[in-house]
Image (cartoon, coloured by chain):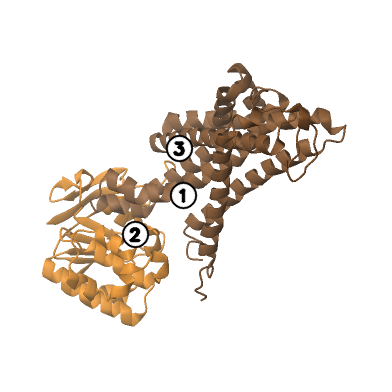
Amino acid sequence: MRLEVNNLIYRYHKKALPVLEEISFSMTNEERVGVAAPSGRGKTTLCKLIGGYLVPEQGEILLDGKSVMEYRGYCPIQMIWQQPELAVNPRLRMKEVLAEGDQIAERVIHGMGIEEDWLERFPTELSGGELQRFLIARALGQRTRFLLMDEITAMLDLITQSQIWNFLLQEVQERKIGLLVVSHSRPLLNQVCTRMLSVF
Amino acid sequence: MRTGFFGNRRRRMIFCLCIMILFLLGICVWGLCLEEAAKVTDFSRKNLSPCPAYLFGTDWMGRDMLVRTVRGLSLSIFIGILSAVISAGIALFFGTISAVMGHWVDGLVNGIIDLVMGIPHILLLLLISVALGKGVFGVVTGVALTHWPSLARLIRAEVIQLKESPYIQIAGKLGKGKGYVIRKHMIPHLLPQFIVGLVLIFPHAILHEASITFLGFGLSSEQPAVGIILSESMRYLVTGEWWLAVFPGLFLVLVVVLFYVSGENLRRLLSPGTVHE
């Protein structure tokens, strides 16, 4: 599958300066693309646009030639949010949160280091890092083809980070899932990605 | 952690809540059984001060004040529940459509909310009740039409916030339909607020019913409503028959406080912040 971004322009208010100006790039589902830029340059905005959470002012995002906004039902492009606390309903138990995803394999749950008794807990009873593992697992559904990872391991310690990335890299290579990795950490991007995006 | 039956606050609260609900229900049912007894007059026992036989005393027509008070309270509770339910229904409807439709609908609903809130409750209530010919119908309509705006505002704000919240947007991207989102995400979040809002309208409704009845714009005088009892007793207070006003008044306050406390307890039980206490 091919993800194409053409001449993307976005601004949050009509009179504001555009956050993204004429951004174009393309990637396949076998690539892992890194994005690095200082705060406030629109990295998260880019992810939200590609994920279909925001509507661009101009330009288009195509998945195999079809606009992402046209996808009904499960979206092959899944985004993992920077703040895991906002991405779960505080009233659902973690097993219900996981069940929202698309047939999550047992292997993925183990690989993310999710422990059995966490499944019965509520989101407020987990730490940010523990919660983030669930959200990564939830996004790794059967039909996922691209993952947008917005600073997903910034809140984790180094050991956990490497544990998660090791599994994730193995999984995406096996299943041919494309990654768009947003991070402040150059060393991480250098290690994880096949190429860097220089649009900012 | 203590683990006895009353060990945690949640258990204690649920227990207290059950007692309150039983008490209120008890008054309601008891009052329903006393419909005829409340009208019995017996001039051989008029103007008795409280005694073991007549705990709340009797009035100038020899009617048992305990029976009249219970009957009045049950009438008040009935009117309170009916008008609170209608009022909360209106609030849910307006709050939701204003949040979901947006644009001019939102503007219109906000305008109506400001309009209703801008007029003092009691005045609007009085006008509606009189225009509709007083009685139970007038009072219920009046109370229902004046008490919805604050709950509607709350629901509107909640729905708008929910619509924009990441976890609901994510559920959409995970292929979950509108039905799932409403059932799993919206209702569990809105229902507690709605129920608490509804319960907290009761005390207002009851007090307003009693006050407009007291002023003579509510229920008709043959009905033993608390407002009627209080307004009639005014004439006898100067002659020293204090029990005519004190007991019904006290019990009205007690019922109102019970409803209020139950509402607050429910809020604490249902809100996620205090749910694990």
The kind of residue tagged 1 is Pro
- Tell me the number on the disc at residue B192: 1
The brown-coloured chain is labelled B
The kind of residue tagged 3 is Leu
Q: Identify the residue at image location x=26%, y=57%.
A: A100
Image coordinates for residue A195, horizontal then vertical, percent: 21, 68
Looking at the rendered structure, the secondary structure element under dot 2 is helix
Dot 3: chain letter: B
Q: Identify the residue at image location x=32%, y=65%.
A: A94
Q: Which of the two marks, 2 or 1, is nearer to us in this view? A: 1
- The CA span between labels 2 and 1 is 37 Å
Q: Identify the residue at image location x=57%, y=51%.
A: B20
Looking at the rendered structure, the secondary structure element under dot 3 is helix
Q: Identify the residue at image location x=27%, y=53%.
A: A51
Dot 2: chain letter: A
The residue that disc 2 covers is A43
The residue that disc 3 covers is B92
Image coordinates for residue B193, horizontal then vertical, percent: 48, 47
The orange-coloured chain is labelled A
Q: Which residue lies furthest to the front in this view?
A: B44
Image coordinates for residue B137, horizontal then vertical, percent: 55, 23
CB under 8 Å between discs 2 and 3 = no
Total label count? 3
